Amino acid sequence: MRHLKYYSILILIIGLLGTSNSLNAQKQSNKFVVVLDAGHGGKDPGKLKNHLKEKTIALIITKLVGNKLKDDKNVEIIYTRESDKFVTLDGRAKIANSAKADLFVSIHCNAHNSQAYGTETYVLGLHRNDDNLAVAMAENSVIYLEEDYEVTYDGFDPKSPESYIGLTLMQEEYLDQSILLADNVESQFRDKLKRKSRGVKQAGFLVLRKTYMPSVLIETGFITNTEEGAFLNSAKGQEKVATAIANAINEYKRTLNLDVFGGVSDQINTPKTVSQTKEEVYGDIVFKVQIAASSKKLNPDKHDFKGLNQITRNQENGLYKYYFGKTSDYLKIQELVKQAKIVGYEQAYVVAFKGEKKINVNEALKSKVN
């Protein structure tokens, strides 16, 4: 992913949400659960510009996203609000945690005192510049509408930069996945919708800090920009934005191959061995084919992976990675990638290991060939 390298800094996440009874609720199925969060609502209008209200636009787009996703029988959609009602930031996170969601997606509109325009998608982290901090402060200020917010948020003050510094490592394991989704969203906005993308960013959003799953906050555009505000307020614009977000979520789901663990599917007859008329062997490098990544821990010896054998599993960044094959021959691993794709693992790709350490494939290929 082109943006991921820019976000390799260590991020710290504010405080750990205490265990509540709602977190004891068990996920009712093996479906991929997406919590869609329409920003603001009720007594909290969000950003305002003339007749435009962020809470109204965000709700319309959010429900359109849900409608586009719900046709997939493997996906379950949960809304934090489906009407014009006020939901606390803490309450939104509790809904997601209680549902044991696989994704949390919060949808908003931006605003500025200029004609700034463009989309932004945020993952949780230390604000990297004053603009990011300003956006986080604006979104977090809603807690002033809540009773006992000092207690609920452990003395957090949205207006104080110091409040964004005392952070912990609790959610670092979700960072890579959150960035992956955020990058998908901005790619859809930029490449498919032809909107200006202001990129994937990091900031300290309270609505993200207490969720225990990959989470993003999407600023769909600036309602304070004359042209963009009109676009976001139009049925056509809302439909296009919702389609882009839904496509990004579906692409994220496909990338993780979370829908390939449902049991034995119809098998495609493929050769179990690979012909080797040539060799390109890297003596101290082991290549494998990554076919899936999931929160599900499966026994490679007992689960059917579409007829593929030689499956291994590693735990990495909060996910279980599943690999097909094992060889130091780069030509052979390319053949194994083709085999994995034929049986249905369309997102399969090569990974490289040196000893127990995963390394960049380009780095591996630069090593000496025996």
Image (cartoon, helix red, strand yellow):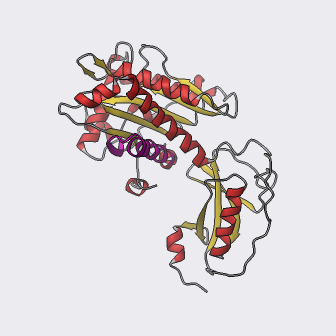
Q: Is residue 40 left or right of residue 227?
A: right
Whether residue 195 is visible to the viewer of this picture, yes or no, is: yes
The answer to which image quadrant residue 251 occupies is top right
Q: Nearer the viewer, residue 112 or 14?
A: 112
Asked if residue 347 is positioned above or below residue 233 in the image, the reply reads below
In this view of the protein, can residue 153 be seen by the observer?
no
Would you say 316 lies left or right of 134 here?
right
Left or right: 227 in relation to 114: right
Most foreground residue, 195 or 308: 195
Q: Is residue 53 above or below residue 345?
A: above
Q: Is 181 contained in the magenta span?
A: yes
13 lies above or below 58: below
Give the image location of residue 362, x and y in percent.
50, 71
For the residue pair 118 and 258, the one nearer the viewer reads as 118
Report the residue at 76% width, 63% height from top: 310
Q: Residue at x 35, y 13 (%)?
A: 43
Q: Nearer the viewer, residue 140 or 77?
A: 77
- What is the x, y in percent for residue 346? 63, 53
Residue 3 x/y as whole percent:
40, 53
Q: Residue furthest front?
A: 236
**Residue 56 falls inside the magenta stretch:** no
Q: Quadrant of residue 106?
A: top left
In the displayed structure image, the side of residue 174 where residue 42 appears, left or right: left
Magenta part of the chain: 177-203
User: Compared with residue 30, is residue 47 higher up or lower down, i.e. above or below?
Assistant: above
